[in-house]
Image: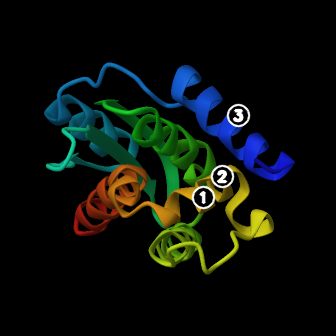
Amino acid sequence: MSDLQQLYQTIILEHAKARHGAVDLTPLADAVALGDASGLRVAESHQINTTCGDEVTLRVSLDIETVTDLVWTGEGCSISQASASILTDTLRGLSTTEARALLDNFREMLRSRGKIEPDEEVLGDAAAFGGVSRYPARVKCAMLPWVAFEAALIEAESH
């Protein structure tokens, strides 16, 4: 295993343990009411990987065109949990346009089956999932929180 692969593996394992952004979610109706009172648009998405049983519920808060907050809860393998943690760190504070561009870049990398080298300048810690792209069953694990983010973002923007 190369030094870079070892580093990526370490990043994934650290995020799987630390789980940045993982919280016990308050009921969505309460979060939406608080969001309305503060001018935020709040939405969430619950996604399940039927192949392995991983699941994640991700909540996004938008202030005009900025992802002001991302929180999540979930259960599953270290890849899905680390992916949710890294997503939280990577996308929080970005404009919705920037967040969508990163999502598209992440998705393209994962679908490449190892043919696209991850760009750390663009993806940050999310580049650690470049090696996962060679394992189609694991791609679903890594994409799960990003799919939840995309669905929650669409919902929040519709408010």
* Image location of residue 131, percent across then percent down: 60, 58
Q: Are marks 1 and 2 in contact (CB under 8 Å)?
A: yes
Query: Which structural element holds mark 2?
Result: helix
Spatial CA span between label 1 and label 2: 7 Å
Disc assigned to residue 131: 1
Looking at the image, residue 60 sits to the left or right of residue 9; the answer is left
Q: Earlier in the sequence, mark 3 or mark 2?
A: 3
Specify the quadrant that holds the C terminus.
Answer: bottom left
Disc assigned to residue 10: 3
Amino acid type, label 3: Thr
Q: Residues within 10 Å of mark 3 (few under 14, many from 20)?
A: few
Please tell me in which quadrant of the rendered image residue 70 appears: top left
* Image location of residue 41, percent across then percent down: 32, 53
Seen as rendered, the residue at the extreme right is 3
Callout count: 3
**Residue in view at x 24 percent, y 39 percent:** 55
Query: Which structural element holds mark 1?
Result: helix
Please tell me in which quadrant of the rendered image residue 152 appears: bottom left
Amino acid type, label 1: Gly
Spatial CA span between label 1 and label 3: 13 Å
**Residue in view at x 32 percent, y 32 percent:** 76
Seen as rendered, the residue at the extreme front is 1
* Image location of residue 114, percent across then percent down: 58, 72
Q: Which residue is mark 2?
A: 128
Spatial CA span between label 3 and label 2: 9 Å
Front position in the image: 46 or 52:
52
